[in-house]
Image (tube, helix red, strand yellow):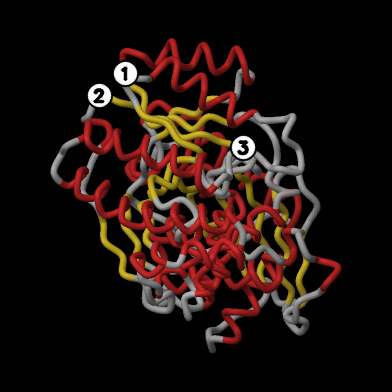
Amino acid sequence: MINNTLLRQNIKNNCYNDFFNKLYRAEDIEKQKDRYIRVSNSYDEIFGSGCDVSVFSAPGRTEVCGNHTDHNKGRVLAASVNLDAIAVAAFNDDNIVRIKSEGYKMDVVDLSELEPKPEEIGKSVSLVRGVCAEFVRRGYKLNGFNAATASDVLSGSGVSSSAAFEVLVGSIINHLFNDGSVSAVEIAQIAQRAENVFFGKPCGLMDQMACSVGGFVEIDFKNPDKPIIEKVDFDFANCGHSLCIVNTGGSHSDLTDDYAAVRKEMEHVASCLGASVLRETDKDSFTKNIPEIRKTCGDRAVLRAMHFYADNERVLQESSALKDGDFEKFKSLVIESGHSSYMYNQNVFTCSDPVNQPVSLGLALCDKILKGKGAWRVHGGGFAGTIQAFVPDECLEEFKTVIKNVFGEKSCYVLSVRPVGGVKVI
């Protein structure tokens, strides 16, 4: 830990620039230094000055392939990005966790009350309570602490602001009280349980795993308790393309039922084949039994199962293409995945509001600009929010201009992939 005043002086004196260079693009370092200093000052204003503190960061993530496969024990290809949540944190003697996130009211959790609270469902305080509860349930140490945080992982942007926040809280607890002994994989599992049980969202494990582990990762969730994680050695910076996340607008906050239906319908198909999830089923058996399955589950469930089987295999194909340096093959597979999400998984817009289709419009614009050049697909959970695009450098300015003209000045993020996940920065 370091005195908070000295922390700010060291940041100004470039003492941590080597580490910042691992987390952020070089052109963003000065802006990030100002951001860390701002959060440090906020800690003093909220909790009092003169304290010894630690500093933490947890990234957002981009889902590269495997759209809605993880919750059925499938495979995903993901990467952590340079948008992150950061915290300045320190112990307290109150047995209470207080987290003040920039722009939001303070979350307060009494560590003697770690059961889910119905009135907290869907609120950030439930994530704090859930992460704390799971650390305790697993036998790890935990006491009270205070934290000031800020996030540029925009809520509803499709780069997992909630997972970044969960992993940030987990990273604080891991390092303040457990000497960093809890693995990145276990922190992801802790974060997922907080979101499932306390927040009330039946998410899979991909978001938390990508945020916690960091870098490009291929993750196989066949055994969710022991996921197989493989780093994929590929640097997008050397392939003449930029990774862009397009925020088409809309919020994920009212889409829990849509997300839950994808999982429910896939699992309904699996139950017709004598299994709990699709990964435990045989694709050939599914194909032979489609006539009976559609009678029991409906056509959309059949289509979503078809998407699962294809995208689960496509993860291996994309990963292999990257390992082989065949970026053109990789791009063709990204487009295939996007078509599958749109046509079969049907998570580009919500049936409850068919008039509003910003993601559909964004994909149409991508097709117009990037066809034969780049690649594009719906990003993350879908139904609203974001698109992922791999944009050739020579098309980048045109792409940004068109996207910003339609969706607004802050709609296009040109990202980098950072090599580490949730981490103690200082």
Question: Of discs 3 and 2, which sits in the foreground?
Answer: 3
Decide if residue 200 is on the left or right side of residue 153. Answer: right
Q: Are marks 2 and 1 in contact (CB under 8 Å)?
A: yes
**Amino acid type of the residue that numbered disc 2 sits on in the rendered structure:** Gly
How far, Cα to Cα, is label 2 from label 1? 6 Å
Helix, strand or loop status at disc 1: helix
Image coordinates for residue 64, horizontal then vertical, percent: 39, 45
Residue 225 position in % (x across, y down): 42, 79
Residue at the (32%, 52%) spot, across then down: 315
Checking the image for residue 423, the label placed there is none
With respect to residue 336, does 228 lie above or below? below
Gap between marks 3 and 2, in whole Å? 26 Å
Q: In which quarter of the image is residue 41?
A: top right
User: Which percent across, then down, holds residue 341?
Assistant: 49, 44
The residue that disc 3 covers is: 385
- Considering only vertical position in the picture, is 57 above or below 276? above
Write down the quadrant of residue 52 in the picture. bottom right
Residue 232 shown left or right of residue 136 in the figure: left
Q: Residue at x 63, y 55 (%)?
A: 259
Mark 1 highlights which residue?
393
**Chain-order first, disc 3 or disc 2:** 2
